[in-house]
Amino acid sequence: MRWVVKVGTSSVCEEDGRLSHSRIKGLAEQVGRLYHRGHEVMMVSSGAVGAGVGRIGRWPQTVGDKQALAAIGQARLIQAYQSVFDPVPVGQILITRADLEDPARRMASGRTLQQLLEWGVVPIINENDTVADEELRIGDNDTLAARVATLVDADLLVILSDIDGLYTDNPRLYPDARRIATVPWVTAEDLAEHTASPGPWGTGGMATKLEAARISQEAGIGMVLASSHEPDVLAKVMGMDWPGGTRFLAQRGNFGA
Ligand code: GLU
C-alpha cells in the first residue's frame, strides 16, 4: 500500500522551535515498521521555519524572514530525518505550486518520487519555502500533502496533527464537542464553516485539513486525520477497527485502496 504521511510543525518541534529528536525518532520508527512490512511511505514534513527559529532564536516578522528561516531549518530537518531513518535511505523533495501545476514539472516531480519509491527510499517532502513567495506558495502542507497523494496515486493520506480528529465544534472552546469518526464526503458548507485558525506554527488549522480531505476524496483517495501524540498511531490507522481519528472516505465509497 502506498502512504503519504503528513506531520505538522508541532509534531516535530518543541514549543520554542527546536527540533524534537525524540518525536522525529518516534515517527521514523513507525514509518520504518510500515516500510519493513513492504509499504511505500512518503512523508510530508513541516518544521523548516520552526527549526530555523529554534536554531537562531529569531521570530519571523515578514515573509522574507520566514523564507530565510526555512533555509536554515530545512537543512536541520532533513539532517534529523536522515539520522533517525538510517540505514533506510531518505530523499529530500522541495516543491512549489508551479512544480505541481506546470505539466512538465509535475511529470518530473512524479517521476522522481516514483523512482525513489522503487529504490526503497523514503521521500521527505516539504514546500520549497525559501523560493516560494506569496504568489508561488501552496502555503500549507495539508493541501501540499493531498496534492502529492494525487500526484503519486497514493492509497491513503494520513495527516498527523496536534488534534485527534474533526469535531462538531472547536473542542478547545466547547468541551462537549464530539469527534466525528467518519466523513463520507466533505461538502462546500463544511469548507465554508471552517476558516483558517492556525496555531503558533501551523499555517492552516482545520480549514486546510478539510481542503486536503476534499482534494483526496475527489481523487478517490481516503484520508485519516489523527493525533501525532497517539502511540503507534500509524499501525492503529492501518487496523481498520481503530475507533480513533477521523476517516474521510475515498469518493469510490471504499476506504483506503
Ligand atoms: N513549509 C512550512 C515549514 O516547513 C510549513 C507549512 C505548514 O505549516 O503547513 O515550516
Image (cartoon, rainbow, N blue to C red):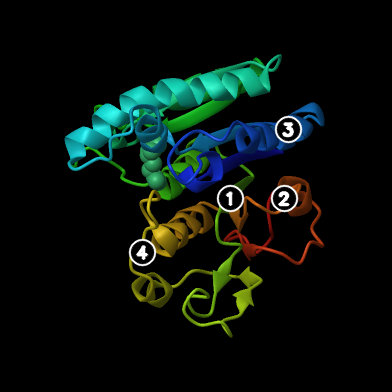
Q: Pinpoint residue 28: horizontal percent, then vertical percent.
A: 67, 31
Circles 1, 2 touching at the beta carbon (< 8 Å)? yes
Task: Find the distance from the CA under tag 3 to the CA under tag 4.
Answer: 31 Å
Q: CA distance from mark 1 to mark 4?
A: 17 Å
- The answer to whether any part of residue 132 appears in the image is no
Ligand 1 quadrant in view: top left
Q: Is residue 224 above or below residue 110?
A: below
- Say which residue label 1 marks: 160
Q: What residue is shown at x 65% (from left), y 15% (from top)? A: 119
Q: Element under label 3? A: helix
Give the residue displayed 41% in from the left and 43% down from the top: 144
Query: Which type of secondary structure does the marked residue at label 4 adopt?
Result: loop
Instruction: Tell me what residue is drawn at x 37 percent, y 53 percent.
Output: 200
The reply, left or right, for residue 133 in relation to residue 14 is left
**In the rendering, which numbered label is found on residue 197?**
4
The residue pinned by badge 3 equals 29
Distance between the alpha carbons at the discs numbered 2 and 4: 24 Å
Q: Position of residue 80 (x, y in %)?
A: 55, 23
In three-dimensional space, the C-alpha distance between marks 1 and 3, rounded to whole angstroms, equals: 15 Å
Say whether disc 2 or disc 4 marks the residue closer to the N-terminus. 4
**Where is 209 relative to 115, above or below?**
below
Place residue 16 in its image quadrant: top left
Q: Tell me the quadrant of the picture where the N terminus can be found.
A: top right
- Image coordinates for residue 124, horizontal then vertical, percent: 53, 28
Question: Taking 191 as reference, is 60 above or below it?
Answer: above
Determine whether the residue tagged by mark 1 lies in a helix, strand or loop: strand
Please tell me which of labels 3 and 4 falls first in the chain.
3
Disc 1 CB within 8 Å of nearest ligand 1 atom: no
- Does label 4 point to a residue whose CB lies under 8 Å from ligand 1? no
Q: CA distance from mark 1 to mark 2?
A: 9 Å
